[in-house]
Image: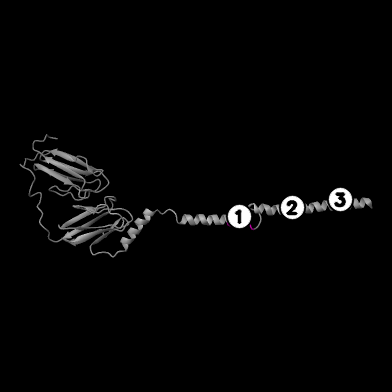
Amino acid sequence: MRKFLIVLIALLTMFGGVAAVAVAVQSGSVLADDDCDSSGPGNPCDDDQNGDRDDDHDGDDHSGHQGGDDDRDTAAQTALAQPVGEREIRIVDERYVPNTITIQVGQSVTFVNADDDEHTATGPGFDTGTMLPGDSVTIAFDTPGTYDFVCQFHSEMRGSVIVEGTGTPVASPAASPVGSPAAVTTAGEAVTIDIVDFAFSQPELTIRPGTTVTWTNTGVAPHTVSGLPAESGTIDPGQSFSYTFDTAGTFDYQCAFHPQMTGRVIVDPNAPAR
């Protein structure tokens, strides 16, 4: 009997210890969940992690916009929302709208920059200058003709103003040659001037009468040779324009699209042969 009681007490002690260990393991698993592991239901870290992600996404959705860009967009949208005038050309999405307009002598055209970038409208005898988003410039046309224009910043942007009617007569340079006397043409002489980087490669050139000068556009923007007895019109990249100087004198010219581009040809009978 004594031995039976000793065995019974030993068994009770052993089973009681196992129960205590089981409780300890269960308690440990709860503590593990509290430490934010990935096991167990109702992980308390889930809400914190989701909250952090939500906050980050919200921040990203509203980032990346600078105040300067917003100001440009606002100015462009304001200009675009204004009623279109009778003789108005708008700049929208790097296009002139409309790109061709017909007016009468003495009328004006208003250029409006409704784009979010800076632009110009530069043509023979006129230039709006740099127009920021929202700017507008009005140009009066007093002489009939066709005025092709471009944007100095975006050479692919082109347009035309057609001016109809009768204007004040303008003296023809061909009827009033500059300089004298006239000289005998000397055939066979030729000179080439490159147009590149918004400049004439030979801004001043001295030649003998009868010399043919050829301007070749090796740049990326359209140009003109304006102010000579013959007008070149638009010289696109890769194209050329030639003129033979038969009369002695000094001939100044410029690019109608880029008035800062100037050149001079001096025709001198005493100049050495080239």
Q: Residues within 10 Å of mark 1 (few under 14, many from 20)?
A: some
Rendered residue at 35%/59% (across/down): 74
CB-based contact (under 8 Å), mark 2 and mark 1: no
Q: Secondary structure at mark 3?
A: helix
Residue 175: give x, y in percent of width and height: 7, 50
Rendered residue at 21%/54% (across/down): 148
Q: Is residue 107 magenta?
A: no
Is residue 76 rendered to the left or right of residue 216? Answer: right
Q: Is residue 46 magenta?
A: yes
- Which residue position is annotated with label 3? 10
Q: What label does residue 112 carry, if any?
A: none
Q: Secondary structure at mark 1?
A: helix
Q: Residues within 10 Å of mark 2 (few under 14, many from 20)?
A: few
Query: Looking at the figure, which quarter contains the C terminus?
Result: top left
Give me the C-alpha separation between circle 2 and circle 1.
23 Å
Label 3 is placed on what type of residue? Ala
- Between disc 2 and disc 3, whose residue precedes? 3
Q: What label does residue 45 carry, if any?
A: 1
Q: Residue furthest left?
A: 181
Whether residue 9 is visible, yes or no, is: yes
Residue bounds of the magenta highlight: 42-47
Q: Secondary structure at mark 2?
A: helix
